[in-house]
Image (cartoon, rainbow, N blue to C red):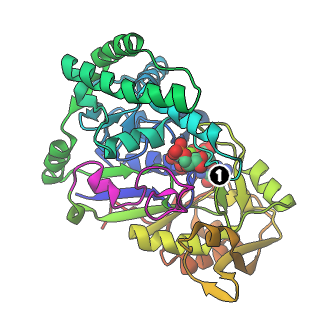
């Protein structure tokens, strides 16, 4: 039995969905443990593209159990729509394939309204560039002990009381502070009664199920969302998301004991991207940045925003290895670097004569550092057809080796294209 956590090492969109899909064939359970539908995980199977926002990427395999853990926040309308879309594509979504934790909090309509109203009220330099999906306000309510849990939908009077109390406060904020439209009780109440009917059959105790799975020697795959540097504690705060995105939260967000985690796969794009605002030391504003953006089709899977692009940041990588306890890397989108004559990797930062081996926690410092680069020779040939490590161009192998050295973890998976098959699995994290 093995339990493997997959996390993003950068600022999200590293290719977690693709790698989770690839590793699902070795797993019995696939578990989302944090975030909500701010995530957009893209999978390509035999040329067909799927984007998941809330359902674990393992759902394409008919014989696996997918779970939405207590650490996730669920927008029921989005979840139900995603279920319907998958069903329309021929998949069966039944309670023996998908389980939802009753302890997961619900994203309510006023959360999205507040998220957008708050962003609109900020000046340009202060805007976080959130996905506008209500993530921050929902986690605020959870921590503030006034959130509504999935399980509350089972108890009509509890749900009614909590919704009333919430609207009392939220509508005051929306109308008086943000000059936005209020949210009407009856409409939300009725809509959520319909959601309840559809979701309650999927409820279960995920912690109990995972413990039973562990005792039966079954394999569990935890699917992270966002990335290490968007973590609420360890990321470039306040330009972060509102949950812990690092591997430790796989345990908290599902009710699974830390001693049972065997491996942590850090997904690392061969260069760096970021959507939304915030420090990005290796960001490129030149033609190379544009080439990466175009060749990598770097547009957000959730909001369609153009992703900012830059060189690989080894400081970000080393931080991620430490924070997550990464045991192996999956280097993705290596094919996008083909054709670049020179490649750069940041190995440290400098600011005011001081050298930094880790991201400064002061956001202004993080935004002002200058990366110290080392330069490597690129390779010309396309590599997306390659399936054997030995067949990679020598310069690509040298690049991978340097990425391993600066990040402090071995490259166990190399991805050379978006399709499930465009992958070199050098070491399977489920095998000890
Ligand atoms: P996630 O949020 O980490 O799951 O990543 P996204 O799905 O948001 O973004 C990654 C994008 O890169 C998706 O469009 C994937 O299909 C694509 N992708 C993943 N791996 C590779 C790869 O090795 N090469 C190329 N060219 N595209 C890839
Ligand atoms: P996946 O799982 C990339 C970013 C937003 C914004 C910040 C806060 O696909 O990698 P939020 O809506 O969470 O309050 O926004 O975090 N962000 C992501 N960026 N990939 C994601 O998810 C992201 N989820 C949130 O762009 O800068
Ligand atoms: Mg994404």
Q: Position of 377 compared to 88: left or right?
A: right
**290 in relation to 312, above or below:** above
> Dominant secondary structure of the magenta stretch?
loop
Q: Where's the C terminus, which quadrant?
A: bottom left
Q: Nearer the viewer, residue 197 or 412?
A: 197
Q: In which quarter of the view is residue 153 placed?
A: top left
Q: Where's the N terminus, which quadrant?
A: bottom left
Q: Position of 189 compared to 297: left or right?
A: left
- Percent position (x, y) of residue 55? 41, 35
Q: Is residue 235 magenta?
A: yes
Inspect this view and state whether residue 234 appears: yes
Residue stretch in magenta: 229-256
Residue occupying the far front of the picture: 176
- Percent position (x, y) of residue 226? 50, 51
- Percent position (x, y) of residue 382? 75, 58
Inspect this view and state whether residue 420 appears: no
Q: Is residue 225 magenta?
A: no
Say which residue appears at 51% left-offset and 40% top-offset: 38
């Amino acid at each position: 039995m093995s339990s493997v956590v997959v996390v993003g090492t950068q600022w999200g969109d590293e290719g977690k969905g693709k790698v989770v899909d690839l590793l699902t064939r070795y797993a019995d359970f696939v578990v989302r443990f944090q975030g909500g539908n701010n995530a957009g995980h893209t999978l390509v199977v035999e040329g067909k593209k799927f984007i998941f926002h809330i359902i674990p990427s393992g759902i394409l395999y008919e014989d696996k159990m997918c779970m939405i853990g207590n650490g996730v926040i669920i927008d029921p309308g989005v979840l139900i729509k995603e279920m319907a879309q998958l069903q329309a594509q021929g998949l069966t979504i039944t309670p023996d394939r998908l389980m939802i934790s009753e302890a997961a909090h619900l994203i309510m309509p006023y959360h999205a309204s507040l998220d957008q109203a708050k962003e609109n009220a900020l000046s340009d330099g202060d805007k976080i560039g959130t996905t506008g999906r209500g993530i921050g306000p929902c986690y605020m309510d959870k921590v503030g002990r006034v959130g509504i849990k999935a399980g509350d939908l089972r108890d009509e009077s509890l749900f009614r009381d909590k919704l009333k109390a919430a609207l009392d406060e939220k509508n005051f904020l929306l109308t008086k502070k943000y000059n936005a439209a209020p949210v009407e009780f009856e409409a939300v109440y009725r809509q959520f009664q319909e959601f309840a009917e559809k979701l309650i059959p999927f409820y279960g105790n995920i912690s109990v199920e995972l413990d039973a799975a562990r005792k039966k020697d079954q394999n569990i795959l935890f699917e992270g969302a966002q990335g290490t540097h968007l973590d609420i504690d360890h990321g470039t705060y306040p330009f972060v998301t509102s949950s812990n995105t690092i591997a430790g939260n796989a345990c908290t967000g599902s009710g699974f004991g830390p001693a049972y985690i065997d491996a942590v796969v850090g997904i690392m794009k061969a260069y760096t991207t970021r959507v939304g605002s915030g420090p990005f030391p290796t960001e490129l504003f030149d033609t190379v940045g544009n080439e990466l953006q175009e060749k990598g089709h770097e547009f957000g899977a959730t909001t369609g925003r153009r992703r900012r692009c830059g060189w690989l940041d080894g400081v970000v990588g080393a931080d991620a290895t430490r924070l997550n306890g990464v045991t192996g890397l999956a280097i993705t989108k290596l094919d996008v670097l083909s054709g670049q004559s020179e490649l750069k990797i940041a190995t440290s930062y400098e600011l005011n004569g001081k050298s930094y081996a880790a991201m400064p926690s002061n956001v202004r410092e993080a935004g002002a550092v200058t990366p110290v680069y080392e330069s490597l020779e690129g390779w010309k040939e396309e590599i997306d057809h390659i399936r054997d490590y030995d067949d990679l161009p020598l310069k690509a192998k040298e690049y991978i080796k340097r990425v391993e050295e600066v990040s402090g973890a071995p490259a166990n998976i190399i991805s050379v294209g978006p399709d499930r098959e465009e992958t070199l699995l050098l070491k399977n994290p489920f095998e000890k």
